[in-house]
Image (spheres, helix red, strand yellow):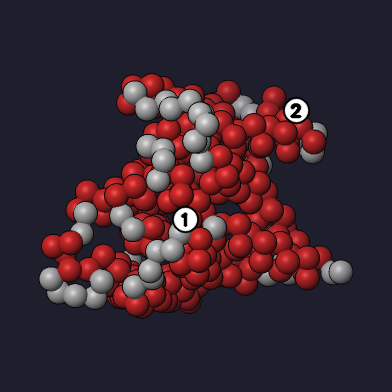
Amino acid sequence: MSPNHLAYLLTLLTLMLWGGSASAFKLALNTLTPSALLWISCVISLAVMTLLLLLQGRLGQLRRIAARDWPRLLLLGAFNPFLYYVLLFEAYDRLPAQVAMSLNYLWPVMLALLSVPILGQRLGWSGLLPILLSFAGAVVIATRGRLDGWQSVDGLGLVVALASTLVWAGYWLYSTRLRHIDPALKLFMAFLIGTPLTLIYSLLQGNLQWPGSDYPWWPVLYVGLFEMGVTFFIWQLALSLADSAARIGNLIYLTPFLSLLILSRVTGETIHPATLWGLLLIVAGILLQQYAGRRAPGGNTAP
């Protein structure tokens, strides 16, 4: 098997694993509070990452991280896993999984918007119109395609869902300042720093929830192993083996559609037609935004 064919197989595995995350979130949150799910899944993910890096003989590379990078890594860990998943799990707890999952894919749009004040990038009409298209898709999802649909929406749920996309976009932008650090080591350090923050947060919330007889172990393990842990390493390997990382990268936008299919089968949640149409608008806007960014002189858009 050629490296490129292996890259596509690994990408398919990545799509399937991340595609099941929304269902795992919802199943776990049927029993756990968001903060309880947060700390245990982060602990599991950190343990898995430690084991993987040990097996690869890469933990020793941590000694090479310069002292000046540690404050930046501290902020990175505060963004992800801590703040990002605090907001994301709260959104899943308040909203239908299909809504929370679909809105989460607005993060490349938020990235483009944040790039204007932070990176000084310009946003002309060719970049603004795709963004408006994606936001139109978000409105369709939130209102289920009805003008009076706002009345049945959990407003706070929508706010935290959109806030999570801003945090993830900020994490991605800030992470680019540490490009000299291996991506896997960078993620490991973020979880090494962020996981204690999730424990402190859960203690302050009074929702530590130690595992008991009715603990939803399967969805929790799924979140810790696949949403946060192993799948990132599989994805990085796929990108490194592919002839075209950009072509492989765009396949990731099939994930939300796979998520909808899995949600309907695993959780029994009825997928509203407006969710599908709105998601199509969001993804179309993202892809058009990337196309516009590549055509613009010196353009650079979200991956």
Residue 230 visible, this angle: yes
Count every numbered label the image shows and give the total: 2
Q: Which of 126 and 21 is in front in this view?
A: 21
Above or below: residue 180 compared with residue 245:
above
Number of other residues with Cα within 10 Å of mark 2, as a class: few under 14, some 14 to 19, many 20 or more:
few
Judge left or right: residue 243 versus residue 180: right
Residue drawn at (43%, 51%) of the image: 26
Q: Which of 276 and 134 is in front in this view?
A: 276
Determine whether the residue tagged by mark 1 lies in a helix, strand or loop: helix
Q: Where is residue 19 in the image (x, y as percent from the top left)?
A: 54, 61
Q: Position of residue 189 (x, y in %)?
A: 58, 32
Q: Position of residue 233 (x, y in %)?
A: 67, 49
Residue drawn at (45%, 59%) of the image: 267
Quadrant of the rendering where the N terminus is positioned:
bottom right
Residue drawn at (43%, 72%) of the image: 283
Q: Position of residue 176 (x, y in %)?
A: 52, 47
Q: Name the residue under label 2.
A: 60
Q: Which of 225 and 169 is in front in this view?
A: 225
Mark carried by residue 47: none
Q: How far apart are marks 1 and 2 (CA)?
A: 34 Å
Q: For the residue marked with disc 2, what is the amino acid?
A: Gly
Q: Earlier in the sequence, mark 1 or mark 2?
A: 1
Of badges 1 and 2, the one in the foreground is 1
Q: For the residue marked with disc 1, what is the amino acid?
A: Ala
Number of other residues with Cα within 10 Å of mark 1, as a class: few under 14, some 14 to 19, many 20 or more:
many
Mark carried by residue 22: 1
Identify the image quadrant of residue 149.
bottom left
Q: Which of 176 and 89 is in front in this view?
A: 89
